[in-house]
Amino acid sequence: MSGAAHAGDAQLFAPLRLEVPAGRWTCLLGPSGVGKSTILRLFAGLGGEVTFDGTFGADDGAGLQGRVALMAQDDLLLPWLSALDNVLIGARLRGDRANRDKAREVLDQVGLTSHATKKPAQLSGGQRQRVALARTLMEDRGIVLLDEPFSALDAKTRSQMQDLATDTLRGRTVLLVTHDPAEAARLGDRIVIMTSDGLHDVPPPPGPAPRGIDDPATLQVQGALLSALRAA
Amino acid sequence: MRRGLTFAAALLLGLAIWQGAIWATGVPRFILPPPTLVAETAWTSRALIAEHALVTFTEVLAGLGLGALLGAATAIGLAQSRLARELAQPILVFSQAVPVFALAPLLTLWFGYGLWSKIVMALLIIYFPVASAFLDALLRTPAGWLDLAQVMGAQKRRILWHIRIPAALPGLGSGLRLAAVYAPIGAIIGEWVGASRGLGYLMLLANGRAKTDLMFAALITLAVFTVLLHYAVNRACQRWLDRP
């Protein structure tokens, strides 16, 4: 995508150009209020009040409509439905047949086999985010948009969710919006810092994601990312 | 156990104040009958009170059911279209500016002396609180759920059915709780204006003949019914509409 966005007269971000390579994880790192989430919402087709001057689309020429799945910081689970029914909500909302077997499989994949019938209130924050991941996997879309999905979790749960997400979303085009340099350094195949002057590429640490939490090269990039954020 | 005790204590306190007021002022029993006399009358006239109570209860329950149904349907209809809301809003505000009490004679003229004029009265009185509480909740679906549904490619009608309505049920519940208290008022007003049966009619009749004890007995029957109705509706809302 390339272009600028504004809501009314207020500019949300200056003209910029962002390319998200297919089949890889792109981490968009930046401080709060810089417009990261706006970019993600534009990709999701949730422009709403935002006016976007510019273009965006996929290399194959087709639109993004119907090819995108979204996972946010809030798990967005419906509290009156069981974990299984929450995973099936996409099919129900589209009027497709609800494939319960596949939903169970996906819950197995995120390690919630024995929690399928529980309501969200009976699950921990990490388990709820796993259900949200299962729901995202169930949608089975080529492009996955992650809007700080792990930032409300404690450090241990967060690192486990990062591992699980990289594992289960392998091969998909992922755009992860985050304000956490450690997360970007661990997960990004490509890391882009967003500040008020625009986007800057930062070379990711070597090795495939998820990188070790104590890997020196990763920690070094994490430090460099934080310095870049503080300098901006 | 503790709740039962405090309830019994409150009841005794109420009766003591009532009886104390009579001893202190020495008012004649046709102005304010003592609790013992009211209890006696309630027992001796139990068949008469039951007969009229049954009529009133039928009116209240029918009015409550129909009003809730109509109010909920209106809310769902209005939630779908901004134009419909803009058109309906002045009408609803105007209808609320008309005192429902003033409509009672008209309703008797339109629907006759029987049950229906009272049912419609109860219906009218609860229609607005149910519709407005439910509509408010329907318009306040958390934005995140709607965004997610949009990204999933949801159909509008299915969003309503799978997300907006279930999310708004607690709002419907608060409307119904109010309705349970209002509905008996509607039925009684209807009976005052024109009826030959029902607790409201019995109260007017007893009052006119200075049978204040009978009037009190009917009044207490109505109050107990209203409290029980509110309790039942509250329990039902907790069971089915409120979120865990």
Image (cartoon, coloured by chain):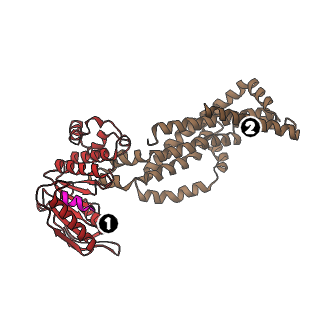
User: In x, y percent, where is residue B131?
Assistant: 50, 49
User: In x, y percent, where is residue B167?
Assistant: 41, 47
The residue nearer to you, when weighing A180 against B41, is A180
Relative side of A10 to B139, left or right: left
> Mark 2 is on which residue type?
Gly
Where, by quadrant of the figure, is residue B57 drawn? top right
- Residue B104 in the image: above or below residue B20: below
Q: Quadrant of the C terminus of chain B?
A: top left
- Name the element at disc 2: helix
- What colour do you see for chain A? red
Same chain, labels 1 and 2: no
Q: Which residue is mark 1?
A: A32
Q: Which residues fall within the magenta stretch?
A: A178-186
- Residue A215 in the image: above or below residue B216: below
- What colour do you see for chain B? brown
Chain ID at mark 1: A
- Classified by dominant secondary structure, the portion drawn in magenta counts as helix
User: In x, y percent, where is residue B61?
Assistant: 57, 35
